[in-house]
Amino acid sequence: MSDIQLHYNNLSPYLLRKYGCRVFKICLDGGFTCPNRDGKKGVGGCIFCGERGAGEHLRPSSVSEQISAYFRRARKAEKFIAYFQNFTGTYAPIAELKEKYDEALSDPRICVLSVGTRPDCVDEEVCELLASYLPRADVWVELGLQTASNATAALCHRGYETEIFLNAVNLLKKYHLNVIVHIMLGLPNETEKDWIATAELVDSVKPFGVKIHSTYVIEGTQLERMYRRGEYTPLTVEAYAAGACKVLRHLSSDILVHKITGDAPKDRLIAPLWNADKNGILDALHEEMERENAYQGDLLIKNRPV
Ligand code: SF4
C-alpha cells in the first residue's frame, strides 16, 4: 500500500517535504549502558529488554566507524538521521555525550541527531547540550514510555513512574527539542483499555512523533521466563493490528508516526514469530484501518466536546 493511501501521518512523506529528498536512518550503538541495568535504578532491566538493548542488531564500534561503515554500503540517499538506538543515549558524563554527538554530526549529510533514552535520564544539562546542536541539525529525543500505567510499568520493571515522563517532556519542550514517544502494545495484563489510556496520555503532551510496536519475547529476557512458565501470552498479529489501529485513532493527526513495527532480532526472537515480518504487520494494520474506515485521530474528533 502506498503512503498516499495510508490512514495515518507517516514519517516518510514528512521527511521528503522537509528535506527535499529521501532521508535514511543510521542506527548507532553509542556504547551506553542503562541505569535500569547497572544498579543505579535497577538490575536486569525491563523484562522485555535483551542483553543488547533496543538495537539488538547493532555491534559496538566507535560512532565514526559505524557511520563510515554505513556510508560504504550506503543506499542512494543524500541525507541521514544519526540515531543512538541502543540502551540509554543520554546516560554518560556530559563530556562523553558531547564527544559522541559531535562524532555523529561530523558529516554534513547528517541532518538529524536522534537520541533514544529514558525520561529519568533527561536533565537541564543534557537538554542544554542537545539544544546546542539545533543550529546545525534537528534534534529528536526518543522516550521509552511504553505504557501510561504505573502498575504495568512496575510489573515490567520500567523503573520510573509516568509522572517522570511528563516532567521530561516539559523539559525537552522548553529547549525546543522534538519528542518521540515509544508505545508498546501487548505488555503483560494490558488490554485495549490500557492502550487507549496510554494513547490519550501521549496525545495530551502533543509529541512530535510516536513509535508503536508489539511486545515480543527475546531470548534470555525475564519475559522469556514468564512466557515459558505460561505466565505471558503474546498478541496475535490480528490483535496487534486492531490495537494499533485503536491507538492511532486516539492520537492527533499532526503527530508523526515514525514506526508501527518493532526491530525484533530474528536470531533471538522467541515469540510471536510474526514480529519478524514487518510487511505482514503493515498489511494487517492497513487492512484493519481500511475495513474500519479508521483514520489517525478520528476518535478524538468524535469525542471532542462541541
Ligand atoms: S530502559 Fe531501555 S535500555 Fe534500559 S532496561 Fe529498559 S528497555 Fe532496556
Image (cartoon, grey):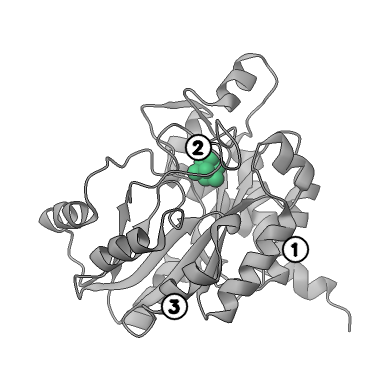
* Residue with the mark numbered 1: 200
Mark 2 → mark 1, Cα distance in angstroms = 32 Å
Instruction: Classify 10 Å Cα crowding around label 1: few (below 14), some (14-19), many (20 and above).
Output: some
Alpha carbon separation for disc pair 1 and 3? 28 Å
For mark 3, does the 10 Å Cα neighbourhood hold few (<14), some (14 to 19), or many (20 or more) residues? Answer: many
Depth check: give the residue in front, 126 or 82. Answer: 126
Q: Residue at x 68, y 49 (%)?
A: 160
Is residue 56 placed above or below 118 in the rendered structure?
above
Residue at coordinates 60% horizontally, 37% vertically from top-left? Answer: 42
Q: Is residue 216 visible?
A: yes
Label 2 close to label 1 by CB (< 8 Å): no
Marks 3/2 in contact by CB < 8 Å: the verdict is no
> For mark 2, what is the residue?
38
Q: Residue furthest right?
A: 306
Question: Which part of the image, by quadrant, shows the C terminus?
Answer: bottom right
Secondary structure at numbered mark 1: helix
Task: Give the amino acid type for the residue marked by disc 3 in the picture.
Answer: Ala
Q: CA distance from mark 3 to mark 2?
A: 27 Å
Q: Given this view, does label 2 or label 1 mark the residue nearer the observer?
A: 2
Horizontal arrangement in the rendering, residue 277 relative to residue 57 (left or right): right
> What residue type is disc 1 on?
Glu
User: In the image, residue 117 lies at what x, y percent?
Assistant: 50, 55
For image coordinates 28% across by 71% down, the residue present is 22
What is the quadrant of residue 95 in the picture? bottom left
Q: What is the x, y in percent for residue 158?
A: 64, 42
Q: Indicate which disc, 1 or 3, sits on the residue closer to the N terminus.
A: 3
Label 3 sits on residue = 131
